Structure formats: structure tokens, C-alpha cells
């Protein structure tokens, strides 16, 4: 200890968390590898908030079984997939140890989990593919451009992750985000999606070139907004499918709004009959709630990782969502805002998306984009 340089008290506290874990953890009757035991102990130290400044960074290491901090960070990732993983792993190790416990608890082999973990800390790849030669495909290449679309995918993902909570990427270990431009009417797309501007499944976005062909206005600006919406759909949580579609799409349009790429075809603030009508209606409502509590949308998204209930609004803001909607509507009921004062009361202007010039807002006759 005499030779230690740094906050000795904090380092010593961390050591005690590690060693106290060694006192209580199961060892599989001696069959659990020492490196795993040290990794679990360092995970507890990490969870308690006492990692050592000398630890390697997250994502480092050549193998999950290197022990100590390397394994601790890997266990942190595994625990993000199942909040009880480390506790359940320890319980399984009461009598014996097997690598198969990872498969039992997370439905993937430990090798695949390690590959997913490493992928989280590798730079994402962005790819744009134009599948056809329709007039819409040609117009996309001419007015939007492959390089611009690729760069916008990157900026949109980075911005969405910042708003939603950057840890989302730990739980969705995608190696790339892909945009496919194609005619929904001509390609193998279910007929129900023909009128849609875009659809997103996992980390792949399909953009309808039929929409592009018929669009009137500044196509580049419009598609930029669409990509911010759809990139949010890649990363956001949906309460394991329980969240209302209107809320999910509203969050995606909120990110688009916050990035500065709203469409002039959107209705005005204060419009709508229900808070969960979706898209711009819900986006403007979320903008109002964000004024009441900075970071609200990100916190709501985190809460929606495993489940959804409307009581989340009351938990975060102290009022149920229906009352919050009434409050929001009352802001615009007393006096309709004039065109010159259309901004939400007390709300700061939306931050411009980094490295992208602010859009020229050109009225469009097209429908509101991103019908997922």
C-alpha cells in the first residue's frame, strides 16, 4: 500500500468488495475456474462503483476467461441481457460448474456471447444498397446520394443512442446498420407495407423508392428526417412488444424533431385527440414532457427495455399520462400560437444534428414518413 499512487481509500474499498465476494460466492465445489471466480468478484466490485483506475477498458481482452476486470466487464454485458444473470449463475455454481450455464440462462453459448460483447466495442459499419433501377431509385442516387445517406445513417444512430441512452448498444450488439432502397410494390415486400415510406426490422431499414419517385419537395431533407426516425427504431426499446405503437413511433419522431429534421407536413403543436396517436402528435407531447424533466425520453426508453406500463409516466413525472396530456393540451387551448410563435412554451430550440447543416424546410405533399 505504501507504493500505491492514487486514491488509496477508494482502491482499498474496491479490494474489500472483491474479497468479500470471494467469501460468499459459490465455487461449484471447487470445479469453477479461478478466473471466473475472480471475474465475478470484480463484477461485484464494479457494480458497487469501485473499479480500479488501473483496469483495462471495456471491450478489451482476447478471451472471456482471462479473469478479473476482463471477465467482470463481460459479465456486466451478460447481466445487461438478463438483470439476474450473475446471481443466477452463482446459484447454479453451488454444486458444480459448466459453461453450459451461459446457454441455459441467455440462450447463447459463451463463445457467441463473447463475440457479441466484442462487437459492441467495435465501430459500427453503415451500408446503403439500392436494389433497383426505377425512377425512385435513380432519384435517390441523384438527389440524396449514397455517400450522404451512409454518413447520415451514422450521425442518426449516434444521435439516437445519445437521446435514448448509449448503453442500448450493449444490449443490441449489431455490427452494422443497413439501408436498402427498393420499390415496395415491385420487390418482395408484403402488400400491407406498399403505402409506407420505410420499415425497419432489427438493424435493417427498407426505404420505399415508390415514395421517393412521387415525393414533391426537397427530397434530401425529407429523407434525412426519415433516416433519423428509422435509426431510432433500430435502437429503441418497445417493452418487449407491449408498448403502444403510437408511443414507439412518437419517440422515433421525437428524436427526428430534436435533431432538427421535422417535416413541414406535420400538424402543429397541440394537435391531436390522444397522447398515443403516434408520430408528430406524440413527438410534440414528448417534447413538452422533456421540458418538465430533462432526459425524460431517455429514462422512459430505459424503463421500456423489458416491459411497458403507462405508470412509468407517473413514476418519472408525478402525474398519470392522461393528466399530463390534459396539461399539455391546456397550454395550447387558451390561445392558439401564432405562426411566428409556434415553439413549445419554455422549450429550448431543438439541437441541430451534429455535422449536418440545418434543413431547408420545404412543404411536402407526401404523407408523414416512417409508417412502421
Image (cartoon, rainbow, N blue to C red):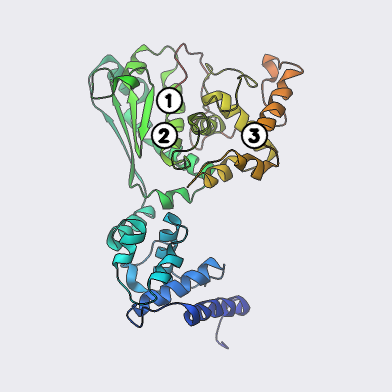
Displayed quadrant of residue 369: top left
Of marks 3 and 1, the one in the foreground: 3
Left or right: 309 in relation to 101:
right
Mark 3, residue position:
321
Q: Which mark is residue 216?
A: none
Quarter of the image with the C terminus in it: top left
Residue, disc 1: 370
Q: Is residue 187 left or right of residue 334?
A: left
Mark 3 or mark 1: name the one nearer the start of the chain: 3
Q: Secondary structure at mark 3?
A: helix
Viewer-side residue, 6 vs 162: 162
Provide the residue designation for mark 2: 152
For mark 3, does the 10 Å Cα neighbourhood hold few (<14), some (14 to 19), or many (20 or more) residues?
A: some
Which comes before the other along the chain, label 2 or label 1?
2
**Residue lying farthest front?**
95
Q: CA distance from mark 2 to mark 3?
A: 34 Å
Q: Is residue 266 above or below residue 57?
A: above
Q: Position of residue 345 (x, y in %)?
A: 72, 28
Residue 149 is left or right of residue 319, and the answer is left
Q: What percent of the width, then of the height, locates residue 149?
A: 37, 31
Amino acid at each position: 500500500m505504501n507504493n500505491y499512487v492514487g486514491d488509496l481509500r477508494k482502491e482499498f474499498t474496491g479490494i474489500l468488495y472483491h474479497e468479500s465476494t470471494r467469501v460468499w460466492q459459490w465455487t461449484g465445489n471447487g470445479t469453477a475456474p479461478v478466473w471466473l471466480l475472480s471475474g465475478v468478484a470484480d463484477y461485484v466490485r464494479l457494480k458497487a462503483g469501485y473499479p480500479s483506475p488501473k483496469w483495462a477498458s471495456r471491450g478489451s481482452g482476447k478471451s472471456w476467461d482471462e479473469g478479473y476486470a476482463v471477465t467482470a466487464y463481460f459479465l456486466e454485458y451478460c447481466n445487461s441481457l438478463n438483470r439476474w444473470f450473475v446471481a443466477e449463475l452463482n446459484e447454479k455454481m453451488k454444486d458444480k460448474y459448466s459453461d453450459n450455464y451461459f446457454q441455459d440462462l441467455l440462450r447463447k453459448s459463451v463463445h457467441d456471447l463473447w463475440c457479441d460483447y466484442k462487437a459492441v466495442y467495435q465501430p459500427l459499419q453503415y451500408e446503403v444498397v439500392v436494389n433497383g433501377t426505377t425512377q425512385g431509385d435513380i432519384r435517390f442516387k441523384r438527389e440524396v446520394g449514397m455517400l450522404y445517406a451512409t454518413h447520415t445513417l451514422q450521425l442518426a444512430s449516434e444521435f439516437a443512442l445519445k437521446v435514448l441512452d448509449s448503453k442500448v448498444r450493449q444490449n443490441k450488439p449489431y455490427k452494422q446498420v443497413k439501408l436498402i432502397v427498393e420499390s415496395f410494390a415491385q420487390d418482395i415486400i408484403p402488400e400491407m407495407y406498399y403505402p409506407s415510406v420505410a420499415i425497419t426490422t432489427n438493424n435493417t431499414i427498407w426505404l420505399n423508392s415508390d415514395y421517393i419517385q412521387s415525393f414533391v419537395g426537397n427530397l434530401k431533407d425529407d429523407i434525412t428526417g426519415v433516416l433519423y426516425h428509422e435509426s431510432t427504431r433500430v435502437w429503441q426499446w418497445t417493452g418487449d412488444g407491449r408498448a403502444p405503437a403510437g408511443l414507439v413511433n412518437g419517440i422515433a419522431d421525437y428524436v427526428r424533431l430534436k435533431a432538427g429534421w421535422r417535416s413541414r407536413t406535420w400538424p402543429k403543436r397541440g394537435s391531436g385527440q390522444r397522447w398515443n396517436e403516434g408520430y408528430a402528435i406524440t413527438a410534440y407531447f414528448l417534447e413538452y414532457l422533456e421540458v418538465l424533466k430533462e432526459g425524460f425520453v431517455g429514462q422512459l426508453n430505459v424503463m421500456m427495455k423489458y416491459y411497458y406500463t403507462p405508470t412509468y409516466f407517473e413514476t418519472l413525472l408525478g402525474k398519470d399520462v392522461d393528466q399530463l396530456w390534459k396539461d399539455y393540451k391546456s397550454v395550447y387551448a387558451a390561445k392558439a400560437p401564432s405562426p411566428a410563435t409556434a415553439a413549445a412554451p419554455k422549450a429550448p430550440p431543438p439541437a441541430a444534428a451534429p455535422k449536418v447543416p440545418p434543413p431547408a424546410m420545404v412543404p411536402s405533399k407526401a404523407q408523414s414518413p416512417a409508417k412502421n
